[in-house]
Amino acid sequence: MRGVVWLVLLFVVAVVAATTLGGNDGLVTFYWSGWRTDLSLNLFVILAVFGVAVLVVSINAIDSMLSLPRRASQWRALRRERAAQSALREALAELLAARYGRACKAAQRAQALQGDAPVLGGEAGEFMILARLLEAAALHRLQDRAARDAAMRPLLAAEWALEDRDTAAAQALLASLPPGLARRTQALRLRLQAARQADEPMQALHLARQLANHGAFSTTAAQAMLRSLATQSLDPAREVHQLERIWQQLEPADRRDPAVAVHAARRAVALGANEHARQWLRPFWEGLSELDADSREQVALAVADAAPGIASDWLPRIETAAEAWPQDAAVQAAAGLVLADRQLFGKARRPLEQSAASPRLPGPLRRRAWRVLAAIAREGGEADAARRCEQEAAALD
């Protein structure tokens, strides 16, 4: 039947082509650099259709070639998923057939394959839970209580201890896990939760990075968690050398995060170590064009906080940034405060006036700008201007 349909369609196409193209006397002429080529309209239409077909086939071929690695990866993931599902079904069948040794091995093989098949739901998914239950049931029938407890009890007991806020018990249970089980994603998740409950941000940061490298979180969630833990790890520092030691212990990826560097700089300013703060902020200030608007604003505000005592080698960088972002109030505030600290009052007045009048900036920074402007006015003998600036600063209190 299908052949008959195709034959009818072929006849229809032939009739339409003969009717349309049979009496077509049109001519297509191409001119190029003194050369002229004449084609019949029928031949031009045929060549155009053929060219479009070749183009479509070529595009499809290129797309197939470029997507080959992705399709190969999907095919391998599908094979691993099918193998894991097959091992799980085998474990269930062997357990029901009272072949407990084989059931245990099949369940262990299913768990091993699950790590290479993220589609199965991760360590906390139904697949892994069922595989562990089958393994534990088989080990129970084999009277291997130690292995049975190692497969089930520590993780579950640790999870229950965390739910009860018994952090010490949870950490003790997690520390007793065998090396293979301790490296599993669910064990790492529980260790991360325990570290956060115990207020150990550096340990939590290390565990969170391991989980992120294993793809346990989405990219956005991993970035937010790592940033939060990195900033929390800086808070316990009460002296400059402690803060510097913690900063050096952070991963290079954390130190390249503008939010982490800004938090570290503000902690350094609070401890009176402005030079450390400027040292950590310098790479970001030199690369302001590579930052988004929010990060650029936070870096500029941190530089403004660390302005007292700034060295003269910062001046070219400050002036370049002020010229590049004339409408950015935070950059102008940083530039004005740095220039004022270097007693370049003539250059500092305009960016300070712009930042002091900007409602987007924090009140304390605007108040500081008004007071610096008042000091500049008094230095120049402008008593009325100094009084007005002091009044503007007082209005922000």
Image: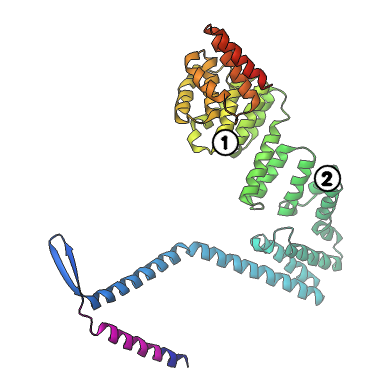
Q: Residue furthest left?
A: 34
Q: Is residue 278 visible?
A: no
Q: Is residue 321 visible?
A: yes
User: Which residue is tagged 2?
Assistant: 172
Q: Main secondary structure of the magenta part?
A: helix
The residue shown at (71%, 35%) is: 232
User: Residue 27 lies in what quarter of the image?
Assistant: bottom left
Q: Is residue 275 above or below residue 73?
A: above
Image coordinates of residue 364 in percent, x first then y, are 65, 23
The circle drawn on residue 349 is none
Q: Nearer the viewer, mark 1 or mark 2?
A: 1
Q: Is 9 in the magenta?
A: yes
Image coordinates of residue 2 in percent, x first then y, are 47, 90
The residue shown at (73%, 29%) is: 236
Instruction: Report the side of 368 relative to 195 (left or right).
Output: left
- Kind of element beneath mark 1: helix
Callouts 1 and 2 close, C-beta under 8 Å: no
The circle drawn on residue 295 is 1
Instruction: Report the side of 228 relative to 143 (left or right).
Output: left
Q: Is 43 in the magenta?
A: no
Q: Spatial distance from mark 1 to mark 2, Cα to Cα?
A: 41 Å
Q: Is residue 152 above or below residue 96?
A: above
Residue toward you, 360 or 178: 360
* Colour pattern: rainbow
Residue toward you, 299 or 268: 299
Magenta region: which residues?
Answer: 7-25
Image coordinates of residue 250 in percent, x first then y, are 64, 35
Three-letter amino acid code of the residue under disc 1: Ser
Q: Is residue 179 above or below residue 111?
A: above
The residue shown at (71%, 53%) is: 185
Callout 2 environment at 10 Å: few (<14), some (14 to 19), or many (20+)?
few
- Kind of element beneath mark 2: helix
